[in-house]
Image (cartoon, grey):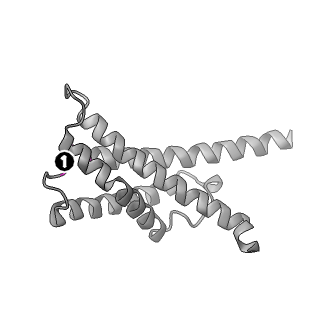
Amino acid sequence: MNRLRAPVLRHRLFQLAADAALAALAFYLAFEIRFIDEPGGIPDRYVEMLTGSIVFVALGKTAIFGLMGLHQKWWRYFNLGDIWSVMRACAVASALLIAIFVIAKPFSSPMPRSVMIFDFVFTLGLLVVARSIARFYFVERRMRSHN
């Protein structure tokens, strides 16, 4: 039980949960932006696609991020060189997402290509921004404590 209180595990669990939430947010925003000009908002068939796949997408991307090493270090140590790792992980996750939606066709309507592109861009942006904010927060806090 003491292991569950260990800072490394606590931070890793937080990072996993945060990445899953950010991946879900990116997927949702991709649909919102794609259908921003639609008079009724997102069409019903795409609402069904979004709600039926958002958990799968979030958990799948988070698993891929973990397999590709994004959770190996704490966000407070994130630096510009790590952006390439995040970009590679996002590219692999997006490629697998596209493959699943194109090959398996889990829904009657195809996934809009623009949603796939927006999802990649939003996922990459949200992951980099979240890690950068954590980094700047901890650097700022450390600088204040040394003054």
Residue at 31% x, 42% y: name it: 30
Left or right of 3 in this view: 17: left
| Crowdedness near tag 1: few (<14), some (14–19) or many (≥20) residues, C-alpha within 10 Å | few
- Classify the position of the N terminus by image quarter: bottom right
The residue identified by callout 1 is 113
Left or right of 95 in this view: 82: right
Q: Which percent across, then down, holds residue 71?
A: 55, 64
Q: How many marks do you count on the picture?
A: 1
Disc 1 is placed on an element classified as: helix
Q: Which percent across, then down, holds residue 93?
A: 35, 61
Q: Depth check: give the residue in front, 52 or 29.
A: 52
Q: Which percent across, then down, holds residue 9?
A: 66, 67
Q: Is residue 92 above or below residue 34?
A: below
Residue at 67% x, 42% y: name it: 137
- Classify the position of the C terminus by image quarter: top right
Left or right of 88 in this view: 66: right
Amino acid beneath label 1 = Arg
Q: Is residue 129 above or below residue 17?
A: above
**Residue 40 seen:** yes
User: Residue 98 colored magenta?
Assistant: no
**Residue 116 seen:** no
Helix, strand or loop: magenta stretch: helix
Q: Which percent across, then down, holds residue 3?
A: 72, 73
Q: Residue furthest right?
A: 147
Residue at 19% x, 29% y: name it: 38
- Residue 25 found in image quarter: top left
Q: Which portion, as a residue range, is magenta?
A: 111-115
Left or right of 63 in this view: 108: left
- Residue 4 found in image quarter: bottom right
